[in-house]
Image (cartoon, rainbow, N blue to C red):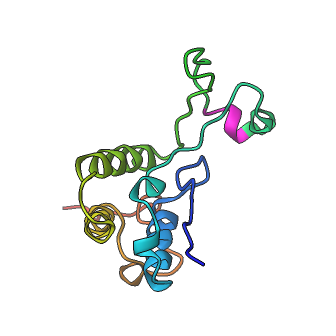
């Protein structure tokens, strides 16, 4: 049996690290050739009657209803995740004729430019939110 995995990797709960982990797992499971590159660019659609509308963390991120697409556009709380999704979609579109392996390699490079590898992070640290002191000069 040939697997053809599908994903919705960009949701309101996606993190940069989580997306990088998804790519690592696909590689570790030797599924790169089985995954269509567009599957790594898909963004969750919140439809007109979606049960997701009942979740406060989703409702806070919604824009006005788009009658043309019948969806509620949403923004991630971390704008870097939205930027990554847009960049992934552009890359996948530009490389539409390339092999899945070449697209995957390009995605890894893109993600490396956005997400620091887990081995580079100090456990429990968050440099973006940790206050620091600057000694007087």
Nearest the viewer among 35 and 15 is 35
Please state the horizontal and vertical placement of residue 74, each as a whole percent of the image.
56, 33
Is residue 3 toward the left or the right of residue 87 in the image? right
Q: Which residues are magenta?
A: 57-61
Q: State whether residue 124 is above or below residue 17.
A: below
Please state the horizontal and vertical placement of residue 20, each as a whole percent of the image.
44, 68
Please state the horizontal and vertical placement of residue 12, each as a whole percent of the image.
60, 46
Is residue 13 toward the left or the right of residue 96 in the image? right
Please state the horizontal and vertical placement of residue 29, each as a whole percent of the image.
50, 84
Identified at 25% across, 68% down, the residue is 102
Magenta segment's dominant SS is helix
Q: State whether residue 14 is above or below residue 45.
A: below
Q: Outermost residue, top direction?
A: 67
Q: Outermost residue, left direction?
A: 137
Identified at 25% across, 61% down, the residue is 136
The quadrant the C terminus occupies is bottom left
Q: Outermost residue, front direction?
A: 1
Is residue 73 toward the left or the right of residue 23 in the image? right
Q: State whether residue 42 is above or below residue 119.
A: above
Tell me where residue 53 sits by quadrant.
top right
Identified at 52% across, 59% down, the residue is 15
Identified at 55% across, 16% down, the residue is 68
Tell me where residue 72 sits by quadrant.
top right
């Amino acid at each position: 049996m040939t697997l053809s995995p599908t994903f919705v990797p960009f949701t309101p709960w996606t993190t940069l690290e989580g997306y990088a982990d998804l790519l690592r797992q696909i590689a570790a499971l030797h599924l790169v050739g089985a995954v269509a590159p567009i599957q790594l660019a898909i963004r969750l659609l919140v439809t007109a009657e979606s049960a997701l509308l009942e979740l406060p963390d989703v409702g806070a991120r919604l824009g006005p209803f788009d009658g043309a697409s019948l969806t509620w556009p949403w923004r991630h709380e971390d704008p870097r995740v939205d930027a990554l999704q847009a960049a992934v979609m552009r890359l996948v579109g530009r490389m539409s004729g390339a092999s899945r392996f070449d697209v995957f390699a390009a995605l890894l490079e893109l993600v490396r430019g956005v997400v620091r590898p887990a081995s580079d992070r100090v456990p429990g640290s968050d440099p973006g939110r940790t206050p620091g002191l600057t000694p007087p000069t």
